[in-house]
Amino acid sequence: MADPFVKGRWIIFASLLLAMALVLIPLPASAPFELNYLRPDWIALVLIYWILAVPEKVGVPAAFCLSLITDLVVGTPFGFHGLSFVILAALAKGSYQQVRMLEIWQQSILIAVALMIVSGVQLLMMTLMLDRSSNLLQFMKPITSALFWPWVFLFLRFCRRRYL
């Protein structure tokens, strides 16, 4: 018999692996601006879902470990995603009971606000750590992420109910 603590961990791991694969898919650079600014933050969406769905299995320590792996996969400086994922996980973990009671469209609005905070932190870190000029197009990611939240939520809920 499988240990209840380990049971179902593979679906969480597989969904995070799929999110990282979606982040690595190259998008073409178009003339007006890069399409990467419209790419949803797949890893953050999956992380938020699992914190809301099973907060006893996924929390702030898992978010920090995921941030270090994300830094390695994406190629950002080590620790770049750390603070933003920890803030995101703390926001989700602290209010998961209230967010669960909301409709999906209301959750999308809250997720957009949380991801705006994360984008602001990342923009500040990019400016301070990497000496790059700030690009306000980065604030498009939370909007597209909020638009994709219902589909991510429904897909992961189906997976959770079936395999967890």
Image: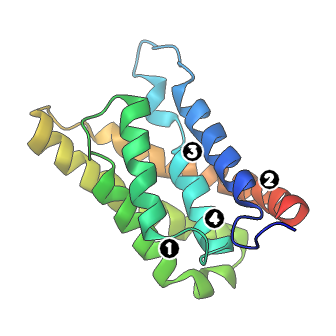
| Badge 3 vs badge 1, beta-carbon distance below 8 Å | no
Q: Which label sits on residue 50? A: 4
> Does residue 112 appear left or right of residue 116 in this picture?
right
Tell me the distance, in whole angstroms, between the alpha carbons under discs 3 and 1: 16 Å
Label 2 vs 4, first from the N-terminus: 4
Residue appearing at x 13%, y 34% in the figure: 130
Please identify, in this view, whether the residue under mark 1 or under mark 4 is nearer the observer.
Answer: 4
Residue occupying the point 34% across, 62% down: 117
Q: CA distance from mark 2 to mark 4?
A: 12 Å
Percent coordinates x, y for residue 38 in the rendering: 50, 35
The residue indicated by pointer 2 is 155
Residue 116 can be seen in this image: no
CA distance for labels 4 and 3? 12 Å
Comes first in the chain, label 1 or label 4: 4
* 7 and 31: which is toward the camera: 7
- Residue tagged by mark 3? 42
Q: Is residue 154 above or below residue 77?
A: below
Label 4 element class = helix
**Do the CB atoms of the residues marked 3 and 2 lie less than 8 Å apart?**
no
Between the C-alphas of marks 1 and 2, the distance is 19 Å
Residue at x 66%, y 73% (from the top left corner): 54
Along the polypeptide, which appears first: circle 3 or circle 2?
3
**Image position of 86 with respect to 122: above or below:** below
Q: Is residue 143 left or right of residue 97?
A: left
